């Protein structure tokens, strides 16, 4: 894909701004450059879990899974989980998407992956789950992405890799699914964990500082040493077309930024200005460059 030059300085190693409706690339920098994406990985993990829940006709609000000791490995654990605790799938997804909870995501991925294993297979639940993440990645048209774990933590050995364009493709796919959006849009939520027969209440807060401002309504933050500070946000605004207000939606992806929230605001503002300048031309014709899958 061609580089689309921004009209203002950006410090992120890579970024892309996309029109959600058409998939058109409005602004980009190093969109195809391979990079680690930290907890943005959890977008794909959440999609695999929701896919499995739908396929097996399970209710995420009631299905409980047990926290394995392997999940208590460091990294974010905002629920304060201990091995042997139980959480619902719903609680785990809210914790993973809102608060970037690695312990919860490992727990859900192992539980779901165990159920995916066919008889006679000598593979772990986590590996089967990651295999499905990569199958999903290929099926929705991600071209430069390889997942190695369900949470995005830096690993020794093989490193997970993606790029800004692929993260945007993933976000476009995810944001078309109402079941996904509910986990990516809340700023605060009270959830429960179960420990030794007791139900304990925990308050979750989103790590996305922009939620609820400037029309921003999703989706995910991520930070590791290798990936730097990363962010995907979605935003909605009405723009005038032929004198009528018409809703528009943008997706911004920021990878390895010294100030991801500032850069997201700058990108979104530029995008709204670009779309507004088109006025009545908005929505006419085909985009020059689209990240939506060609078969859509």
Image: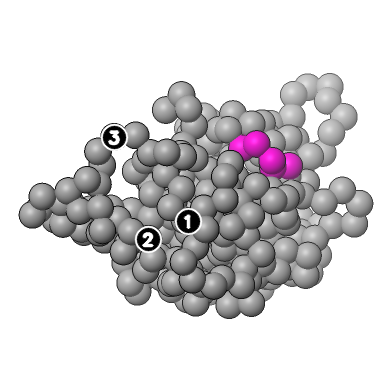
- Mark 3 → mark 2, Cα distance in angstroms: 18 Å
Tally of numbered discs: 3
Q: Which mark is residue 271?
A: 2
| Mark 3 residue crowding within 10 angstroms, few (<14) / some (14–19) / many (20+) | few
Q: Quadrant of residue 285?
A: top left
Q: Nearer the viewer, residue 37 or 155?
A: 37
Which badge, 2 or 1, comes first in the chain's sequence?
1
Relative to 209, residue 52 above or below: above
Classify mark 1: helix, strand or loop. strand
Range of the magenta residues?
A: 142-146
Residue at the spot 37% in from the left edge and 68% down from the top edge: 269
In the rendered structure, which disc, 1 or 3, sits on the residue that comes first in sequence? 1
- Helix, strand or loop at disc 2? helix
Q: Looking at the picture, tell me which residue is in the foreground, 182 or 171.
A: 171
Q: Residue furthest left?
A: 243
Q: Disc 1 marks which residue?
A: 27
Q: Position of residue 77 (x, y in %)?
A: 67, 70
User: Which residue, given by chain and number where applicable, does mark 3 sit on?
Assistant: 285
Seen at 84% across and 33% down, the residue is 123
Q: Is residue 102 above or below residue 279?
A: below
């Amino acid at each position: 894909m061609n580089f689309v030059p921004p009209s203002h300085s950006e410090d992120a190693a890579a970024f892309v701004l996309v029109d959600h409706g058409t998939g058109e690339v409005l602004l980009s920098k190093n969109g195809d450059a391979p990079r680690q994406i930290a907890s943005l990985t959890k977008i794909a993990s959440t999609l695999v879990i929701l896919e499995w829940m739908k396929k097996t006709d399970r209710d995420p609000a009631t299905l409980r899974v047990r926290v394995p000791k392997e999940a208590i490995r460091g990294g974010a654990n905002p629920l304060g989980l201990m091995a042997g605790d139980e959480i619902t799938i719903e609680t785990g997804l809210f914790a993973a998407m809102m608060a970037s909870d690695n312990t919860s995501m490992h727990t859900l991925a192992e539980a779901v992956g165990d159920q995916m294993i066919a008889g006679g297979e000598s593979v772990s639940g986590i590996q089967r789950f990651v295999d499905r993440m990569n199958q999903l990645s290929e099926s929705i048209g991600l071209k430069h992405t390889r997942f190695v774990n369900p949470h995005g933590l830096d690993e020794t050995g093989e490193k997970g890799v993606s790029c800004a364009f692929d993260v945007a493709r993933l976000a476009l796919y995810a944001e078309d699914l109402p079941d996904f959006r509910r986990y990516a849009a809340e700023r605060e939520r009270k959830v429960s964990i179960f420990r030794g027969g007791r139900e304990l209440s925990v308050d979750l807060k989103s790590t996305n500082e922009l939620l609820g401002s400037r029309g921003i309504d999703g989706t995910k933050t991520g930070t590791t040493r290798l990936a730097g500070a990363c962010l995907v946000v979605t935003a909605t605004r009405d723009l005038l077309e032929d004198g009528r207000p018409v809703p528009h939606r943008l997706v911004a992806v920021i990878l390895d930024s010294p100030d991801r929230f500032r850069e997201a605001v700058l990108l979104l503002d530029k995008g709204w200005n670009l779309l507004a300048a088109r006025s009545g031309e908005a929505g006419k014709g085909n985009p020059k460059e689209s990240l939506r899958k060609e078969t859509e």
